[in-house]
Image (tube, rainbow, N blue to C red):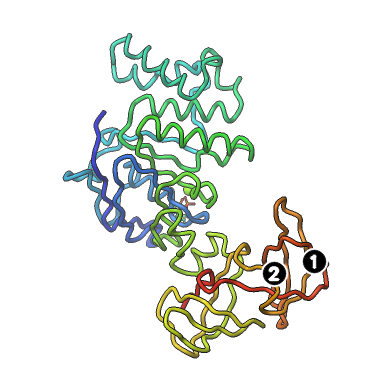
Amino acid sequence: MTTFQELRLDGVRRRFGGKDALTGLSLTIRRGEFIALLGPSGCGKSTALNCLAGLLPLTDGSIWQDGSRLDTLPPERRGFGMVFQSYALFPHLSVRKNISFGLQMRRLPRDEVRRRTDEAIKLVRLEEHARKLPGQLSGGQQQRVAIARAVVLEPSLVLMDEPLSNLDAKLRLEMRTEIRRLHQSLGLTTVYVTHDQEEALSLADRLVVLRDGRVEQIGTPEELHNRPANAHVADFMGYRNLLPMKVKAVHGDTVALDGSGLTLEGTPVGPVAPGDDVVAGIRPEDLRAGPHGVPVTVEVVEYQGRELAIEARTAEGVALFLRATERPSPGDRITVTADPSRVLVFP
Ligand SMILES: Nc1ncnc2c1ncn2[C@@H]1O[C@H](COP(=O)(O)OP(=O)(O)O)[C@@H](O)[C@H]1O
Ligand SMILES: [Mg+2]
């Protein structure tokens, strides 16, 4: 296996017809990492992946594998494996032949082709289906063939572009675990594109959040979850309450806020001063019904197993999403509080 210690993207940019699809992507991928590129449709995820793969030339910037320049090499010289949303299997070849095809193209000895194909089939748990044609398999099984076909070549980097988006919800969860298991057991380095933040958070060691072709934040799931860099990333990370408020006073590490029918204490994510208009970001699970706090009116109560999800309204009519352990009724007046460390204040 050709391998590397790190892969460095330096100011990677790609334009289409005078419009930037991707600008200023700088990222160092360490060997063994699982990186997710996350963002809404059209934000430049596939463009980034295709630039890495060599399927798209860069408009500007460079890509380095350890000390050597990579972006000038054609795709086949980069030694990367790719898995796409559409499986793109050979319909007339059996599962086994689809998987062994790349090894045969490399003119490897027959014994080695057989051994490595067997291993790959076992890894993706398709032993019982090895003789079938792709058309005889379920969507999830076909995607497993596509994955086996990529990893059997022992690529130094595996690139996956929304590989699970054609599968139903249950299979998606199963395959997610499968992909993480393969990544670990084969010691792969993986770059994975998705628009699903839950998928990205559960799979990746680090996430790159993209918006309109630009990097919004790069960090571990914990970093993004606890410290989103701005209100947009916060929105993506489940901060359902994004409330326009005003800074009343700054005391040390916290600020007093007012607005949207609420008064709260929060923690600023950037510099703020009294009088500033800000957005307060709070996750529903951090906004709790309790004996003290701001009065709100309950509108909808949903049972969610261990807890209740509540939608309420402030005196100014702003919707709030929160959690409770005891069931209120619609129309009830309750009071809500949040720990100041869990109220993020975005300038
Ligand atoms: N071949 C192309 N020609 C022109 N515009 C393109 C091409 N490929 C992508 N784009 C544009 O670049 C932007 C980013 O696209 P893409 O990387 O495919 O987004 P994503 O994968 O995040 O959905 C979009 O505005 C898209 O329309
Ligand atoms: Mg795409």
Look at 56% across and 42% down and name the residue there.
Answer: 165
Determine whether 40 is above or below 50 in the image. Answer: below
Q: Residue furthest left?
A: 67
Q: Residue furthest top?
A: 111
Percent from the top left, x then y, of residue 202? Answer: 50, 46
Q: Which mark is residue 66?
A: none
Instruction: Indicate the secondary structure of the residue bearing disc 1.
Output: loop
Quadrant location of the N terminus in the rendered image:
top left
Side (left or right) of 103 relative to 178: left
Percent from the top left, x then y, of residue 252? Answer: 42, 82
Compute the Cα span from label 1 to label 2.
Answer: 10 Å
Instruction: Indicate the secondary structure of the residue bearing disc 2.
Output: strand
Q: Nearer the viewer, residue 282 or 277?
A: 282
Q: Which residue is mark 2?
A: 289
Look at 50% across and 90% down and name the residue there.
Answer: 275
Q: Amino acid at mark 1?
A: Pro
Percent from the top left, x then y, of residue 265? Answer: 54, 79
Q: Which residue is mark 1?
A: 328
Percent from the top left, x then y, of residue 180? Answer: 46, 37
Is the C-beta separation of discs 1 and 2 under 8 Å?
yes
Number of residues whose C-alpha sits closer than 10 Å to that of mark 1, classed few (under 14), some (14–19) or many (20 or more): some
